[in-house]
Amino acid sequence: MKIVLTGGGTGGHIYPALAIGDKFIEKDPSTQILYIGAYGGMEERIVPAHGFDLKLVRAKGIDRSNPIKLFQTAWNTEIGYRKALSIMKKFRPDMVISTGSFISAPVVLAAHKLGVRIYIHEQNAFPGVANKQLSKFANIVFLGFEAGGMYFKDHDKLVYSGNPVRKAFYDLDRTQCRKELGIPEDDFVITVFGGSLGAATLNDIGVECVREYAGKSGTSVIFGTGRNYYSSVVRKLDALRIKDHDNIRVTPYIDNMPAVLGASSIVISRSGALSAAEIMTAGRAAIFIPSPNVTGDHQYYNAKAVADEGGAVIVREDGDSCVRVVNTLAQLMREPETLEEMEQGSRRVAPLNATDIIYDNIMSDIRG
């Protein structure tokens, strides 16, 4: 079987696609996977490192701020479509599986032109523009959150699967993960990150956590700044003279996220679909600060799905969100029973069989 995967720009689109690809290879090792991504996206680094073949095409997100930018989007999509068409004519896939973002448009349109089966996965509780528009071409639309179904017109195509998470996040042992990372077994481990690209508000919170706990025995802080923010955060920490402590780890990107989540006592992060799914699968308590700058406030609804089961606390971003997060953290550190209950709540909503649901439904559709 030959499969084209697409979806890119951020890890939130890429990693679910890789998890789905892994499931097909697990079921049939002869499966051939080709990933089609966009020039300049994170897929350029992540996909080859994962071991899948990668081809790149031109694509650009929709920017309605002026007619010139809309034209640029249309022009790039057309060029990307022609390149994707050429790639797929040579590869001759049995299906295309898309996890969204602007790169999915030219690839899905090319698949439709060639009569290739199309399957879409929407990670968020409020769907992205590309997935909503391209769903009319799909055989099945898989949902990361059931609430997302109300935004699609053809409900007969919808299947709730949850969000695919790589197997590395399953059954993590806290003691083993801390040993792997060189963290004292009995420390309270605080992990702060703002997603693959970083987030200014999360970095302000991370700086405050470092300021509060640098040099304090019994506590460790892991702080992922995002590559775009790393230099500025380091300058700020250097000015405060609080960075160079053995219990503080500041990094532009958390490459070993399974081990870091596994080692964590609590996670402070945005609530993008992938971050939420990985935290739930790891069974960790969270303080979510949903981004206010996303379509349909979907990060809030992602977080709410976890908080409703007791797995997370939601702090809305505003002028004093940093203070409220730090205060909430301090309170939870004094309440181990509450943290244990939060971990149980997180596990209750973990999408542990998402890739199985996706695989089984696709194979059933193929068999007719």
Image: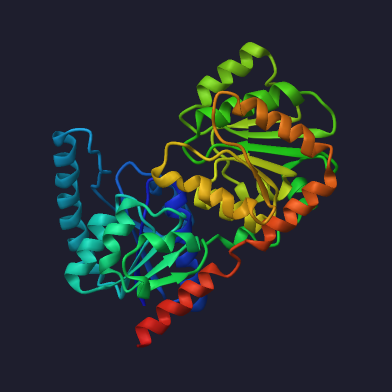
Residue 128 image point, x, y percent: 36, 52
Q: Residue drawn 80% across and 33% down?
A: 219
Q: Is 243 rendered above or below residue 15?
A: above
Q: Which of 38 and 344 is in front in this view?
A: 344
Q: Nearer the viewer, residue 235 or 130?
A: 130
Quarter location, residue 283: bottom right
Q: Nearer the viewer, residue 96 or 147?
A: 147
Q: Is 157 rendered above or below residue 365?
A: above
Q: Residue drawn 15% across and 50% down?
A: 79
Q: Is 264 rendered above or below residue 16?
A: above
Q: Quadrant of the C terminus?
A: bottom left
Q: Residue drawn 66% across and 32% down?
A: 325
Q: Is residue 55 visible?
A: no
Q: Residue drawn 73% across and 50% down?
A: 177
- Count the labels in the image: 0
Q: In which quarter of the image is the N terminus?
A: bottom left
Q: Can residue 362 be seen in this view?
A: yes
> Viewed as shown, does residue 274 lie left or right of 116?
right
Residue 256 image point, x, y percent: 61, 46
Residue 170 image point, x, y percent: 65, 61
Residue 244 image point, x, y percent: 70, 21
Quarter location, residue 168: bottom right
